[in-house]
Image: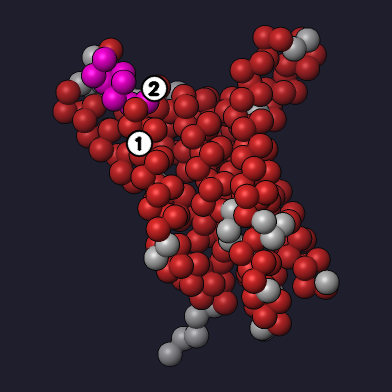
């Protein structure tokens, strides 16, 4: 019988803990309420069967709800002291971070699954362009991957879950909203801010334009914060 790899064991444990907690269902429920308002306000009030409004606000929604999912991942272990026990086991910091990250990403993507009903509604009552729909969900996966990595890093820095939430939410909000202030910035700065803003890359993909530069941006952002988290866990191990 093949022994499970440590990261897979950690991932399974985290998912079991997550889906047995009422916090998970509260966060997912609230996400669906707000995303539903964005979709159905256009669907019923404007009489337009499209998901553009939903995708436009998705970076901001993720900025609030993904940090709420990730805030306890390391903070709770740091507060209770179980992180020290975990790190004394024959498991590397990379495997610890990988297991917790993948569990958190699955949890974040689980919030998106019920939103497929919006696509079904659009197909029934209209003829949506499926290019932007597919692009929107591809961008949502990449955006969730990046924001989950940011949330995990914030959680690894503090024992306080609330501090972890606000730190991650602040970083994600800046990446989501900075593009809204481009008109106020001088010309030479616009291109720089536009490049580092997650919402501009997400918007490009959600229009159905899959550019390798946008995908590389999200992969790089995700990898960067995962590396930061591994270093943070290594410091905790040494401490």
Location of residue 140 with respect to 67 vertically, above or below: above
The question of residue 43 being in magenta is answered with yes
Location of residue 214 with respect to 101 vertically, above or below: above
**Is 50 displayed left or right of 237 in the figure?**
left
Image quarter (top left, top right, bottom left or bottom right) of the C terminus: bottom right
Q: Of discs 1 and 2, which sits in the foreground? A: 1
The answer to whether one can see residue 112 in this image is no
Which residue shows up at 78% across the image and 17% down it?
189
The alpha-carbon separation of the residues under discs 1 and 2 comes to 17 Å
Can you identify the residue that label 2 sits on?
52
Q: Quadrant of residue 114?
A: top left
Which residue shows up at 39% across the image and 33% down it?
34
Which residue shows up at 68% across the image and 74% down it?
81
**Tag 1: Cα neighbours inside 10 Å, few (<14), some, or many (≥20)?**
few
Q: Secondary structure at mark 1?
A: helix
Report x, y in % for residue 131. Answer: 36, 27
Q: Main secondary structure of the magenta part?
A: helix
Q: Which residue is outermost to the right?
A: 239
Report x, y in % for residue 83. Answer: 67, 73
Answer yes or no: do the residues labelled 1 and 2 have beta carbons within 8 Å? Answer: no
**Tag 2: Cα neighbours inside 10 Å, few (<14), some, or many (≥20)?**
some
Among numbered discs 1 and 2, the one appearing first in the sequence: 1
Which residue shows up at 67% across the image and 38% down it?
171
Report x, y in % for residue 130. Answer: 32, 28
Of the numbered discs in the image, which one, if any, rests on residue 33? 1
Image quarter (top left, top right, bottom left or bottom right) of the N terminus: bottom left
**Is 44 displayed left or right of 21 in the figure?**
left
Q: Secondary structure at mark 2?
A: helix
> Where are the magenta residues, as a range?
38-45
The question of residue 135 being in magenta is answered with no
């Amino acid at each position: 019988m093949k022994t499970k790899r440590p990261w897979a064991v950690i991932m399974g444990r985290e998912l079991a803990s997550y889906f047995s907690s009422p916090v998970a269902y509260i966060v997912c429920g609230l996400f669906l309420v707000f995303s539903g308002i964005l979709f159905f306000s256009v669907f019923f009030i404007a009489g337009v069967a499209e998901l553009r409004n939903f995708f436009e606000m998705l970076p901001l929604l993720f900025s609030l709800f993904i940090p709420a999912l990730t805030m306890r991942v390391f903070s709770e272990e740091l507060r209770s002291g179980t992180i020290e026990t975990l790190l004394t086991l024959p498991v590397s910091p990379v495997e610890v971070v990988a297991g917790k990250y993948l569990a958190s990403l699955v949890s974040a993507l689980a919030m998106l699954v019920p939103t497929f009903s919006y696509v079904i509604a659009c197909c029934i009552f209209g003829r949506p362009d499926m290019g932007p729909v597919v692009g929107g969900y591809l961008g949502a996966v990449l955006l969730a991957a990046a924001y989950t990595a940011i949330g995990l890093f914030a959680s690894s820095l503090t024992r306080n879950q609330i501090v972890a939430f606000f730190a991650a939410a602040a970083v994600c909000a800046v990446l989501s909203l900075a593009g809204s202030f481009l008109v106020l910035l001088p010309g030479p700065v616009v291109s720089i801010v536009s490049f580092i803003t997650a919402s501009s890359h997400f918007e490009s993909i959600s229009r159905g334009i899959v550019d390798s530069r946008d995908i590389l941006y999200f992969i790089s952002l995700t990898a960067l914060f995962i590396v930061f988290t591994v270093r943070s866990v290594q410091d905790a191990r040494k401490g």
